[in-house]
Amino acid sequence: MNDAILTEQQVAQFCLDLPGAREDYKWGGVRVFSIAGSKMFALQNLRGSSLAFKVDQELFLGHVDRPGIAPAPYLARAHWIIMQTPYPLGAEELRALLQRSHQLVVGKLPKRAQVGLLL
């Protein structure tokens, strides 16, 4: 394994610390991290057993080829991946991917809505 592994709570706190992020609970047990009202960038099973988020389209196949990472059900067509706990990525890489997911979603917002959300 690479560097330290993040806990489910550390992942949740990192997501909430990103600009404009908020959380909701949906679908009978999914913690949804979103921006601009309803634009999701990460999903965490309430039991902490899985984490899903968006990745760059051109890197999607490379990610799902890695052990412990799979296409996210229902969201793979939008280039989302899913992993179970313990997360197969080190803390630094996982934070970078979550931040990138956030920025991919911000980039799809109207320009006026992006103010204050870009990193």
Image (cartoon, rainbow, N blue to C red):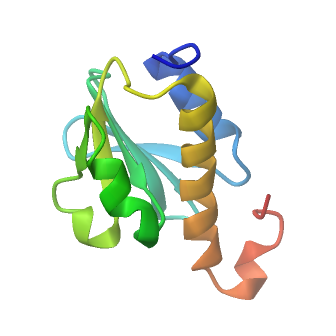
Q: Residue at x 57, y 79 (%)?
A: 108
Q: Is residue 34 or residue 84 the one in the foreground?
A: 84
Q: How many marks?
A: 0
Residue 92 vs 59, above or below: the answer is: above
Residue drawn at 54 percent across, 56 percent down: 101
The percent coordinates of residue 16 (x first, y second) are: 62, 38
Report x, y in % for residue 7: 48, 15
Q: Position of residue 29 (x, y in %)?
A: 24, 34
Instruction: Answer yes or no: is residue 36 visible.
Output: no
Residue 36, how many percent across, how many down? 60, 66
Q: Quadrant of the C terminus?
A: bottom right
Given residues 60 and 79, the one toward you in this image is 60
Q: Nearer the viewer, residue 20 or 100?
A: 100
Report whether residue 50 is seen: yes
Q: Quadrant of the N terminus?
A: top left
Rendered image quadrant of residue 50: top left
**Residue farthest to the right, as pictured:** 116
Please identify the quarter of the rendering in which residue 61 is found: bottom left
User: Viewed as shown, does residue 38 lie left or right of 77?
Assistant: right
Q: Is residue 114 above or below residue 18?
A: below
Q: Residue at x 32, y 22 (%)?
A: 48
Residue at left offset 57%, top offset 13%: 4
Is 71 on the left-hand or right-hand side of 119?
A: left
Left or right: residue 29 compared with residue 21: left
**For residue 92, above or below residue 109:** above
